[in-house]
Image (spheres, rainbow, N blue to C red):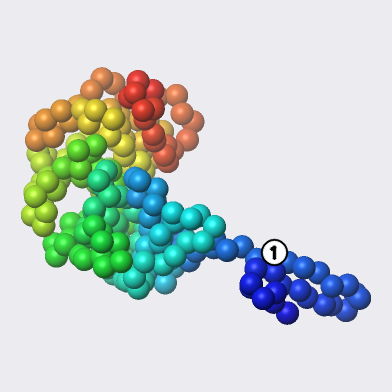
Amino acid sequence: GFSPDGRTLATGSGDNTVRLWSLPTADMVGRIGMFRPDGRVLATAGRDEKLRLWNVENPHRPVPLGEPFRPGEGTVRELTFSPDGHTLAMMTGDREVRLWNVTDPAHPAAYKRPIALRTRFAGALAFSPDGRTLATAYDDRTIQLYDIGDLPRIHRLGAPLTGHKGYVNALVFSPDGRTLASGSADNTIRLWNVADPRHAGPRGEPVTGHLGPINALVFSPDGRTL
């Protein structure tokens, strides 16, 4: 039996006891999730290949925003919001990155042109701090920068960044947007000078010392520590 407010369940069993169970009110459907930069909206992607947006201003009572939607073919493998929260980038299946306009999160709208990828094993996306550049990883162990400052138009910026000998698992821009860090299955981190993303290149030697793949990267707010 449920309590009147639906937050407690009472069960009776063959061991002659009654137990009361507190039901969580903040459970949301999803396998992976990403907060909008202001923390008020959460995007979740589930195994049903659908994406859901939630109002989480009250974290104890998340509220669905609009209907679940299928952003592309295959499971959503990576999610990231642009710094202004108006664009949501997602990697779908092993074929493409799709960009959605989520200015009104209850009515998301797809930008028509996806970025074609082949990323069965690699999987990393990152927005620059100004939201005008998107970095993506490819299965050929390269990184490509895109100009997305005038959506829906999307343009490649320069040649792919090469050097890693393993799949690229993580990408992050420094807070000032002048450096891109990439973490790889080759156990190294590489730093890239992206002050001019049309002519990006290596910044120093690869960072070594890890004994396993680099799966996540984050800069400190002042950009001095990775």
> Which residue is located at x 14 percent, y 65 percent?
112
- Which of the image's four quarters has the N terminus? bottom right
* x then y, percent, for residue 190: 30, 29
Left or right of 33? Residue 194 is left
> Which residue is located at x 31 percent, y 39 percent?
171
Count of numbered labels shown in the rendering: 1
Up/down of 86 relative to 171, above or below: below
* x then y, percent, for residue 84: 25, 46
* x then y, percent, for residue 104: 26, 61
Q: Is residue 97 visible?
A: no
215 or 11: nearer the eye? Answer: 11
Up/down of 146 relative to 96, above or below: above
152 or 84: nearer the eye? Answer: 84
Q: Tell me which corner region of the image, top left, top right, bottom left or bottom right, holds residue 60.
A: bottom right
> Which residue is located at x 39 percent, y 34 percent?
218
Left or right of 9? Residue 38 is left
| Residue position for label 1 | 22
Q: Is residue 158 visible?
A: yes
57 or 218: nearer the eye? Answer: 57
- Which of the image's four quarters has the C terminus? top left
> Which residue is located at x 13 percent, y 34 percent?
197
Left or right of 159? Residue 65 is right
Up/down of 201 relative to 96, above or below: above
* x then y, percent, for residue 54: 40, 61
